[in-house]
Image: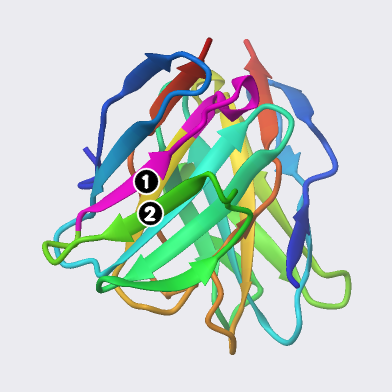
Amino acid sequence: DSGVTQTPKHLITATGQRVTLRCSPRSGDLSVYWYQQSLDQGLQFLIQYYNGEERAKGNILERFSAQQFPDLHSELNLSSLELGDSALYFCASSVGGGGATNYGYTFGSGTRLTVV
Amino acid sequence: AQSVAQPEDQVNVAEGNPLTVKCTYSVSGNPYLFWYVQYPNRGLQFLLKYITGDNLVKGSYGFEAEFNKSQTSFHLKKPSALVSDSALYFCAVSPVLRDTPLVFGKGTRLSVIA
């Protein structure tokens, strides 16, 4: 157990629907990062939050949004889902607010999203 | 913007032989460099990092990596491969002086054959 908890582990939904993925960071970590892993694109950075505030934005579609709550857990909302959104979505956390810390990132086990 | 290239999608090696997984990077200034490993149905696990200092970095499970600034490379190595090393390996980079998240390569699948 890495200490980063992601739920649900698997999600199957239809095109056009909306889903919410949840992540609880490792205890003491203030930063949460969301990554999308697909076979052809590898691991793509979506967005980072630090202590409740958006810190960095990557290749995140406008249909996607995220937030980090006062208890530091984060949610990634995916709407108007398309077949191409099927992927593994990972959450990672780190101690500091800097993008690359001396301690690296701790990853959750991911949520596998299948859009049918 | 920073980027990482892992030129090999797949590396096959016989058990007991040395292995190398290649990584080159592009970043403004000095880099933070990381290697992560992903086993089936699991998240990425930290293997090792280069921050500063000695160019040869030792990490978990007998892995090491050599930082070469002139060639902008950070190849992952192990003297003797095990079947249990079979997994997906990711190299990642971030510039030292900028507050930007890690950028990952596309990953290299290592297959160790008994």
Task: Say which residue appears at 87% left-offset and 77% top-offset.
Answer: B70
- Specify the quadrant that holds the N terminus of chain B: bottom right
Q: Is residue A106 visible?
A: no
Q: Is residue B14 above or below residue B26?
A: above
Closer-to-camera residue (A1/A14): A14
* Label 2 element class: strand
Q: Position of residue B79 (x, y in %)?
A: 64, 41
Say how the picture is coloured. rainbow
Closer-to-camera residue (B48/B82): B48
What is the magenta range? A73-88
Q: Residue A53's quadrant in the figure?
A: bottom left
Image side of residue B46 versus residue A73, left or right: right
Task: Say which residue appears at 56% left-offset and 60% top-offset.
Answer: B34
Q: Which residue is mark 1?
A: A76
Closer-to-camera residue (B41/A74): A74
- The amino acid type found where label 2 is placed reads Ala
Badge 1: few (under 14), some or many (20 or more) residues near its Cα, within 10 Å? many
Q: Position of residue A33 (x, y in %)?
A: 41, 57
Q: Position of residue B89 (x, y in %)?
A: 61, 39
* Label 1 element class: strand
Q: Is residue A54 above or below residue B79?
A: below
Structural distance between the alpha carbons of marks 1 and 2: 4 Å
Task: Say if the magenta span includes residue A37.
Answer: no
* Chain of residue at mark 2: A
Q: Are marks 1 and 2 in contact (CB under 8 Å)?
A: yes
Q: Which residue is mark 2?
A: A66
Image side of residue A44 versus residue A100, left or right: right
Q: Is residue B30 above or below residue A16?
A: below
